[in-house]
Amino acid sequence: MTKPSFEIADFGVTKYGEKARKFTLRGAGGVILEVSDYGGKVVRLFTPDRDGAMKDVVVGFDSPAGWDDGDPYWGCIIGRYGNRIGGGRFTLNGAAYQLPALNNAPGGIGCNLHGGARGWNAYVWVAEPFVKGDDVGVVFTHVSPDGDEGFPGRVEVKVTYTLTAANVWRVDYEAVPDKDTPINITQHVYFNFKGESGGTIEDHVMTIDADSVTPTDRGQIPTGEIRRVDGTPFDFRAGMRIGERINEPDEQLEIGKGYDHNWVLTKGVMAGGPGGLIRAAEVTCPLNGRAVEVWTTEPCLQVYTANWASYDQTAKGGEHLSFRCGIALETQHAPDSPNKPDWPTTIVCAGATYRSTTEFRFGVR
């Protein structure tokens, strides 16, 4: 075990004229995590394979310019509301709110996606690195003003990244609004355990601890149904190659061009479970043994296999990305929850504290 440490370097200037920095976190267990204060973006993440060889296993860019040129949300903090709100509309305390509805899937009517035109992913946050015992990390803080992207209330938010000696990357979220408002924060990191230029993740094996999904309409807004996965391409309970059934003739796969769906975690509160930190998923690369388990306090998991990303961008090291080059495992409440009163609420009351934790536990199989 090595001594945990961090280094700080310049990371360039964003299109908004804000100077960004990069923090290299060296964990006591060997994992190395490079993150930026520009939206909490994960720039690089090095993990060992079964032979001990280290490789960067996340998709991203070498500078802010990559994200600024049509941000695909690689590795970002997503807020104030992760995922979609149908039509960009919701009603709260008798008042109707219209948010920017810029994302329009084929056949859809538009929606608010990942917080709007300039979500929390597109700001430079205040960042304070730390070493505490065997842990190393960064505390990110940000203030979202009242009316930000149409949402009510001023929100003070803190996101803490911690890299532990057990090769766990823990993400702790806290947010306090001064008005009732929807809050649904997540991390949008994309993994490819063959490396960013390793091609598709369809050969990775995935397990999802979920009995149900929330099917969507053609605009990718949940219909309100909670559907069992039995006998469908969405049943990953026993583990399955991601690409094994991804191209089957299934209406939901056609809508998402693959997996871009919300699973209801079996032990999560949406499924009637007790809550607390539960396992959501595991993804393993049989080629080299690299693996991650995702544990969370959230009730749902959005799995996205990079079906809609732009592949004409140049990623790190001058590499061009391939179709389905990564997988995002977004822990969250269900999409469009402000318009689904029977689902666990995403409304945080004025003065209350929103809290959520997700752990990415890296290992070898």
Image (cartoon, helix red, strand yellow):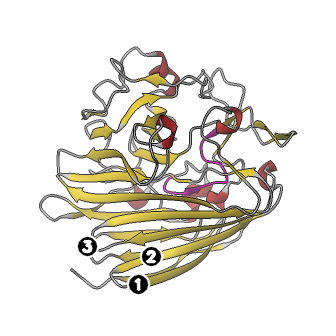
Q: Going by the image, does 137 lie left or right of 18?
A: left
First along the sequence among labels 3 and 2: 3
Instruction: Report x, y in % for residue 175.
Output: 65, 63
Mark 2 or mark 1: whose residue is earlier in sequence:
1
Q: Position of residue 134 (x, y in %)?
A: 32, 81
The residue type indicated by label 2 comes to: Gly
Mark 3 vs 1, N-terminal side:
3
Q: Is residue 96 left or right of residue 203?
A: right
Please state the extent of the stretch shown in magenta in the rendering.
Answer: 74-84
Q: Which mark is residue 30?
A: 3
Q: Secondary structure at mark 3?
A: loop
- Kindly tell me whether residue 104 is visible in this rendering: yes
Which residue corresponds to mark 2?
137
Residue at 56% of width from left, 43% of height from top?
333
Q: Is residue 280 above or below residue 187?
A: above
Q: Judging from the image, what secondary structure is the residue with disc 1 in?
A: strand
Q: Residue at x 56, y 24 (%)?
A: 216
Disc 1 crowd, CA 10 A, few/some/many (<14, 14-19, 20+): few
Image quarter of residue 30: bottom left
The residue that label 1 is drawn on is 132
